[in-house]
């Protein structure tokens, strides 16, 4: 055990850290929903704009889920489904192109709006996703800006390119007044009158464009206005995000350490031998340890949450699911502790082995670094560890409005893992107890 502690475990820890924080070269999963209204191909001065020009740029750096409903009802359903995917963690961001997005793109005085939804319960994922989306939109912006600048330059050149007396007028408004007075002259021939009227229409168009100069500049500089919003219920602060991680870590730290140490201590003190000659079955003894440890963990976790609630009013979206997740996590932790006890020879060894088991899980479970950002090998390891599912379920219950259906996968994994570990730990400790007698 000393050899493991001094030599092998540091190498294992360095390998895990290198695996977790290595450049994963993974794409960011993003869902895109496109309204069917006003988002067909649009042409501006011979240049055609399509939604695909943006989604292709997003797809270059993301794993894209594209919703293109054909009706407004379908658009609403697709938006709800995309929001659900964001809350349960299937995607890191949702981009919504509302009605008439592309139509607005072709207007000189309108900023087209696109909605970007992020889940702030995981700051690292949401920040990366926001940067990815903004980068793709900015590349499309550059393309639109170039087209609109060319149009405005052409319009200004045409407006300022008059000849003779027209070019020398003090202002376009003065020119318009002069032309209107000239149009009232009865001595003009029909042809001259038509020319004056054409000039009046032209000057009025120029004035209209120049009076909208501020909107034109905004439209050219930022043709797409990305409205970023966060899918949360109420306010969300960094301290709120810390609480679920703290509770999950305390569950597994206490559960594995307490159950393994208690089991090994009973074996060392020969209490297990005395229990073996009693009419109480080994399963009943282990079940009592499980029950006591789960109650202790539940009380400890609720105390942490209550203290955070009183201190800064931490969010708890689904209290019933929260308690259930704590109980399921405690069950899995106790099962893992019994397995550790079966491997350990004494209490010192069980304590050390518990630390060796919990510590790698801290880095692979998503407590400090999102699992989706890890390389495939690290993600596979993370999805085999119960702490990963406890963290996800607790965050969902506290910060994401998870229902029991949303947390079903987390609950099932923790319960199945706990049952398998409990049976394996029971068998292993039974062998240890018989060997001791």
Image: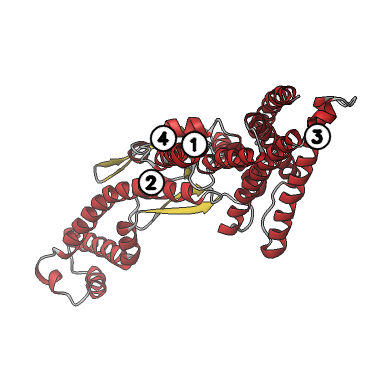
In the rendered structure, find residue 132 and report the number of the disc placed on it: 2
Q: Residues within 10 Å of mark 2 (few under 14, many from 20)?
A: many
**Residues at circles 3 and 1 in contact by the CB criterion of under 8 Å:** no
* Sequence-first tag of 3 and 1: 1
* Sequence-first tag of 2 and 3: 2
Q: Residues within 10 Å of mark 1 (few under 14, many from 20)?
A: few
Q: Which residue is mark 1?
A: 4
**Marks 4 and 1, how far apart in space?**
26 Å
Nearer to us: label 3 or label 4:
3
Q: Which of these two is toward me, 224 or 267?
A: 267
Give x and y (percent) for residue 292.
80, 40
* Sequence-first tag of 2 and 4: 2
Q: Which residue is mark 4?
A: 375
* Sequence-first tag of 1 and 2: 1
Nearer to us: label 2 or label 4:
4
**Marks 1 and 2, how far apart in space?**
43 Å
Among all residues in the image, which is located at the extreme right?
279
Q: Residues within 10 Å of mark 4 (few under 14, many from 20)?
A: some
Give x and y (percent) for residue 263.
73, 35
Q: Which of these two is toward me, 217 or 139?
A: 139
Element type where label 1 sits in the image: helix
**Marks 2 and 3, how far apart in space?**
60 Å
Q: Is residue 248 visible?
A: yes
| Residue at x 84%, y 29% (from the top left corner) | 275
Give x and y (percent) for residue 294.
76, 40
Element type where label 2 sits in the image: helix
Element type where label 3 sits in the image: helix
Q: Which of these two is toward me, 254 or 362?
A: 254
Element type where label 4 sits in the image: loop
Q: Which residue is mark 3?
A: 271
Task: Answer with the quarter of the image where residue 303 lies.
Answer: bottom right
**Marks 3 and 1, how far apart in space?**
30 Å
């Amino acid at each position: 055990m000393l050899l493991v502690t001094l030599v092998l475990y540091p190498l294992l820890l360095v390998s895990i850290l290198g695996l977790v924080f290595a450049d994963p070269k993974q794409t960011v999963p993003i869902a895109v929903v496109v309204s069917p209204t006003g988002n067909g191909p649009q042409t501006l001065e011979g240049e055609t704009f399509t939604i695909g020009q943006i989604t292709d740029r997003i797809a270059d750096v993301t794993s894209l889920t594209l919703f293109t409903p054909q009706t407004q009802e379908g658009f609403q359903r697709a938006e709800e489904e995309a929001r659900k995917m964001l809350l349960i963690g299937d995607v890191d961001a949702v981009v919504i192109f509302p009605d008439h997005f592309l139509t607005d793109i072709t207007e000189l005085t309108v900023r087209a709006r696109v909605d970007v939804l992020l889940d702030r319960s995981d700051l690292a994922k949401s920040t990366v996703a926001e940067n990815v989306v903004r980068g793709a939109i900015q590349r499309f912006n550059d393309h639109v800006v170039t087209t609109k600048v060319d149009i405005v330059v052409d319009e200004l050149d045409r407006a300022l390119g008059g000849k003779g007396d027209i070019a020398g007028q003090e202002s376009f408004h003065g020119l318009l007044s002069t032309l209107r007075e000239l149009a009232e002259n009865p001595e003009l021939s029909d042809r001259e009158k038509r020319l004056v009227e054409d000039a009046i229409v032209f000057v009025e168009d120029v004035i209209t464009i120049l009076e909208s100069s501020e909107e034109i500049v905004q439209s050219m500089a930022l043709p797409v206005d990305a409205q970023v919003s966060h899918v949360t219920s109420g306010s969300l602060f960094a301290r709120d995000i810390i609480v679920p991680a703290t509770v999950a870590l305390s569950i597994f730290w206490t559960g594995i350490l307490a159950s393994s140490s208690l089991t090994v201590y009973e074996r060392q003190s020969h209490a297990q031998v005395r229990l073996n000659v009693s009419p109480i079955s080994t399963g009943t003894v282990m079940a009592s340890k499980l029950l006591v440890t789960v109650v202790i963990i539940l009380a400890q976790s609720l105390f942490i949450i209550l203290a955070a609630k009183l201190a800064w009013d931490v969010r708890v979206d689904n209290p019933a699911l929260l308690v259930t997740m704590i109980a399921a996590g405690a069950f899995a932790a106790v099962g893992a502790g019994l397995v550790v006890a079966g491997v350990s020879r004494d209490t010192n060894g069980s304590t050390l082995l518990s630390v060796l088991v919990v510590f790698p899980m801290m880095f692979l479970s998503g407590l400090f670094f999102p699992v989706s950002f890890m390389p495939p090998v690290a993600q596979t390891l993370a999805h085999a560890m119960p702490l990963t599912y406890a963290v996800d379920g607790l965050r969902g219950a506290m910060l994401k409005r998870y229902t029991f259906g949303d947390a079903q996968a987390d609950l099932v994994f923790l319960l199945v893992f706990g049952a398998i570990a409990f049976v394996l730990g029971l068998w292993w400790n039974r062998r240890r107890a018989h060997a001791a007698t």
